[in-house]
Image (cartoon, helix red, strand yellow):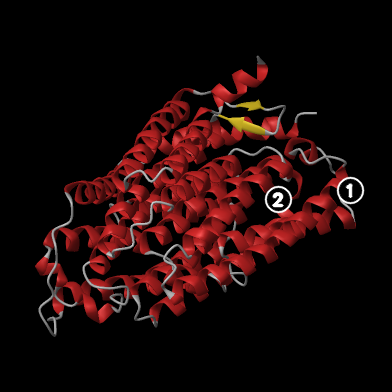
Amino acid sequence: MELVNDLLLFLPAAIVAVGGLTVMMLDGYKAKSRTIYTTTMAFLSVALVIATYDLFMREPQEIFSGMAGVGGTAAFGTFIVVFGTFFTVILTHDYLIGIKHNFPQVYPLLMFCTFGMIVLATAYDLVTIFVGLETMSICLYALAGIIRDKRLGVESALKYFVMGAFSTGFFLYGITLLYGATGSTSLAEIGAYTDGGLIYWGGVSMLLVAFMFKISAVPFHMWTPDVYTGSPTTITAYMSTAGKTASFVALVLVLDRAMPFITAELTAVFTIIALLTMILGNVVAMVQDNVKRMLAYSSIAHVGYLLVGLAAGSVAGYSAVLFYLLAYTFMNVGAFGVVAYYEKNHDVHFNNVESYAGLGYQHPIMGILLSIFLFSLAGIPISAGFNAKYLVFSAGIEAGLISLVVVGVLASAASAYYYLRVMVFLYFREAKEKVSLMKPRKVYSYSLAFLALLTLYFGVVPGGVTEIIFGYFSESAVAATAP
């Protein structure tokens, strides 16, 4: 009965897993692509409703003998992952039809990948983190090269696989060393270990290196631009939001529950990595002419801002990171969704910024939506991106990281150049030739409009969400230090 109860508490993940198996069987029996897509959306809709309920109503507790958790941070991570997947599937269906590569295999892969992300975001044990991480990664390798006749896509999938396998080695070695030092893989039990030692610090170092690979922080970012550029555009949106959210939530849980006593020692490490990531991500993004590659380096820069919250090592810092992940999901899925719309009307090479000349007038709604998302990514006030950056920088100031915050603010100001550059071409450059744009399906337009609305809403009214998130860590910190 305890197992059944745990499965009921873990219902969003269970529904996504069953959904993945169902759509895989439908594909095996040659069901129509529309049927597979509709079935996928039905399962995701149910999972999203339950994840939303858990977010507001579920009390934090451990399940599966302490291997995973529900409620609190785990519920928040689950909600963002399922939410991001829900809109990714909507955009992907229309995008793949537009580029004439509507492979039905993409839907079970997305479902199984989402299951891995939920496991990763709810893990209270290093073994569970590893299972979730590998389930997610294997599916992402396949999704990156799903367009098999596209050489760039196959190349990006291979690069992703090689670098992912490399980081997996670090992760496993880190688990081994931490188990050798503490005698446990439970995050709470590792958090109660205060003796330190060479083996312990070796395990911590290996674990953090693996996480830095997964979140694409400098200097472990080298795979990101090529993989993001070569993957289908909507899949890139999925990688950079849901995938990054799962990895960051797992990292936050590890720091909060397993390493509460070494926060001060890790501050210097996160500070250096945050500085390098913010500077390199923004500087290289400035010289990119390919919009997808620019957004790839932009995502690296945003990892730097998120690391400011981790460097703070406080309840305010961890809370700011979670809010940032929510806001980033809205604006980045939206931005890539508009890029995918422009791209699917032409070909996969329609990503040069000069190709956007005059498109803001040919389809004004899409131009306005892209402008909202880019303004938010730049951190312009009255947008979710502004509040997200404000929260992480405030946490940094409270922790005394003044120099780091100053660099972050300057880097964020510099990012306005390459975001606004796209809008300059949309509205202030004339197209060299007339471009024929098909009207997007209503569900595609409404989805992007809804994401834009959320981006603006959380730019004006972020308070309720931040108060909910703040309560997670006061509870989890107590759990982590409990004997």
Check the image and report above or below for 227 versus 450: below
Where residue 261 appears, as percent x and y from the top left, is 76, 45
Q: Position of residue 107 (x, y in %)?
A: 42, 48
Marks 1 and 2 sit apart, C-alpha to C-alpha, by: 21 Å
Q: Residue at x 68, y 28 (%)?
A: 64
From what the image shows, is residue 35 above or below residue 357? Answer: above
Q: Horizontal and vertical percent for residue 293?
A: 41, 74
Q: Is residue 407 left or right of residue 93?
A: right
Residue nearest the observer in this picture, 170 or 331:
170
Which residue is pictured at 23% across the width and 78% down the height? 355
- Extreme residue in the bottom direction: 432
* Residue linked to disc 1: 180
Q: Nearer the viewer, residue 327 or 106?
A: 106
Say the numbered circle drawn on residue 204: none
The part of the image, by quadrant, that contains residue 381 is: bottom left
Q: On the image, which quarter does residue 268 sit in?
A: bottom right
View extreme (front): residue: 29
Q: Amino acid at mark 1?
A: Gly
The type of residue carrying mark 2 is Thr
- Alpha-carbon neighbours of circle 2 within 10 Å: few (<14), some, or many (≥20)? some
| Foreground residue among 12 and 416 | 12
Q: Residues within 10 Å of mark 1 (few under 14, many from 20)?
A: some
Residue 410 in sight in this render: no
Residue 79 visible (yes or no):
yes
Q: Residue furthest top?
A: 1
**Sooner in the amino-acid sequence: mark 1 or mark 2:** 1
The residue beneath circle 2 is 263
Relative vertical location of residue 30 with respect to residue 274 in this rendering, above or below: above
Residue drawn at (51%, 54%) of the image: 244
